[in-house]
Image: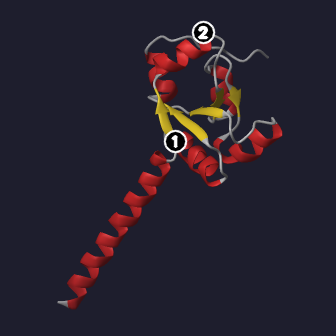
């Protein structure tokens, strides 16, 4: 009987931990919708837009004006490019997980205005919104 309870408690704790991690990853960045970001880009009032996908994905297509910093190097990449922690930053990847990890990293480093693009590149592309390709 105590073995069954122990397994139930262990399963419950695993669910709690997984839920907390998911909430942290998704909850450290507010969301900006595509139309709002597109309007800012068109008005030449865009925030710092960061593509956290691989270099190959970035070269294939990316949002207009986006800089490439892989999700695993986001903090050092922004410092290297001299972006202040107070600047508005929009992160995106193909569909969300890498941007979530990058957002969590920036949150923990004290960045104040971190946003995640709603739907990420997958939805941006599906809506036929403007994209750029890297020139070689």
Badge 2 is on which residue?
Answer: 42
* Quarter of the image with the N terminus in it: bottom left
Asked where in the image residue 38 lies, by quadrant, the reply is: top right
Q: Dot 2, crowdedness within 10 Å: few (<14), some or many (≥20)?
A: few
- Determine whether 17 is above or below 101 in the image: below
- Residue 43 lies left or right of residue 83; in this view the side is left
CB under 8 Å between discs 1 and 2: no
Nearer to us in this view, 90 or 97: 90
| Cα gap from disc 1 to disc 2, whole angstroms | 23 Å
- Residue 66 lies left or right of residue 97; in this view the side is right
Badge 1 is on which residue?
Answer: 29
Q: Earlier in the sequence, mark 1 or mark 2?
A: 1
Asked where in the image residue 11 lies, by quadrant, the reply is: bottom left
Which type of secondary structure does the marked residue at label 2 adopt? Answer: helix
Residue shown at the point (43%, 14%) measured from the top left: 127
**Coordinates of residue 105 in the picture (x, y in percent):** 62, 51
- Determine whether 131 is above or below 59 in the image: above
**Coordinates of residue 68 in the picture (x, y in percent):** 70, 31
Q: Is residue 95 visible?
A: no
- Residue 128 lies left or right of residue 84; in this view the side is left
The residue lying furthest to the bottom in this view is 2
- Determine whether 104 is above or below 31 in the image: below
Which type of secondary structure does the marked residue at label 1 adopt? Answer: loop
* Quarter of the image with the C terminus in it: top right
- Determine whether 50 is above or below 112 in the image: above
Q: How many marks?
A: 2
Asked where in the image residue 2 lies, by quadrant, the reply is: bottom left
Residue shown at the point (54%, 13%) measured from the top left: 39
**Coordinates of residue 88 in the picture (x, y in percent):** 63, 32
Q: Is residue 27 visible?
A: yes
Q: Dot 1, crowdedness within 10 Å: few (<14), some or many (≥20)?
A: many
């Amino acid at each position: 009987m105590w073995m069954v309870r122990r397994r139930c408690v262990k399963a419950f704790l695993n669910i709690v931990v997984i839920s907390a991690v998911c909430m942290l990853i998704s909850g450290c960045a507010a969301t900006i919708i595509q139309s709002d970001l597109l309007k800012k880009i068109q008005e030449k009032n865009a925030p710092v837009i960061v593509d956290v996908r691989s270099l190959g994905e970035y070269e294939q297509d990316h949002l207009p004006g986006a800089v490439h910093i892989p999700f695993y190097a986001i903090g050092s990449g922004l410092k290297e490019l001299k972006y202040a922690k107070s600047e508005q930053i929009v992160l995106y990847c193909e569909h969300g997980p890498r941007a979530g990890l990058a957002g969590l990293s920036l949150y923990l480093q004290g960045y104040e205005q971190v946003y995640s693009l709603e739907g990420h590149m997958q939805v941006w592309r599906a809506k036929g919104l403007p994209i750029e390709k890297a020139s070689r």
